[in-house]
Amino acid sequence: MSKGIIQIYYGEGHGKTTAAFGNAIRAASEGKSVIIIQFLKGKNENVLNFLGRLEPEIKVFRFEKSSERFEKLSENEKQEEIMNLRNGFHYGKKVVTTGACDMLILDEVLGIIDEKVISPAEMLELFAGRPEDMTVICTGRVLDEGIRKHADEIYNIAPEK
């Protein structure tokens, strides 16, 4: 049994999701199962259809209903979408507690912490329930200091030019 880790990609630069997906492809090529839950991305059907081709090794979920990115929604639309985002996070917790995969990627989960959809304490609960052999990868722009302490690997993705 291999030991899983908590890995974080954060920062203002582009490539956090790409790095996480690269890990997913590597894990799948090694025969491991991967679940990806995306937050704050909107519901772009073209992207979802393409990502669906990666199944059954890599399963991708989005719980948002809006086709717009979260930051572009009105306050009323944001309130509706917050319930969907929380449902996605709760699904992630269920994946962890049931050990449903070898690698769980929570893409832009740091963003829903920053938007106060979930608390840092809720994220730490998810980490605490992680099976020892499961890798959890989190992405987002802003990294809460309390979460930083619990990560095994942290990568700050920042543009230089």
Image: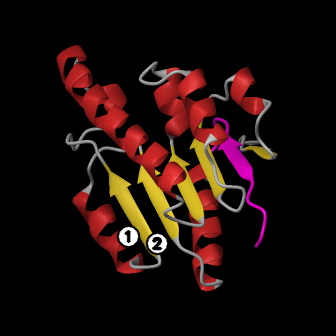
- 123 vs 41: above or below: above
Residue 6 lies in the magenta stretch: yes
Vertical placement of 99 versus 123: above or below? Answer: below
Visible in this render: residue 40? no
The numbered dot on residue 95 is none
Badge 2 is on which residue? 58
Q: Residue at x 55, y 57 (%)?
A: 104
Q: Secondary structure at mark 2?
A: strand
Boundaries of the magenta span: 1-13
Relative vertical location of residue 79 with respect to residue 41 in this rendering, above or below: above
- Give 147 or 49, whichever is nearer the viewer: 147
Q: Amino acid at mark 1?
A: Leu
Question: Looking at the rendering, in which quadrant would you find the C terminus?
Answer: top right
Q: Residue at x 46, y 18 (%)?
A: 116
Q: What amino acid type is highlighted by mark number 2?
A: Ile
Image position, residue 92 (x, y; %): 45, 47
Q: Which residue is mark 1?
A: 51
Rendered residue at 30%/44% (across/down): 42
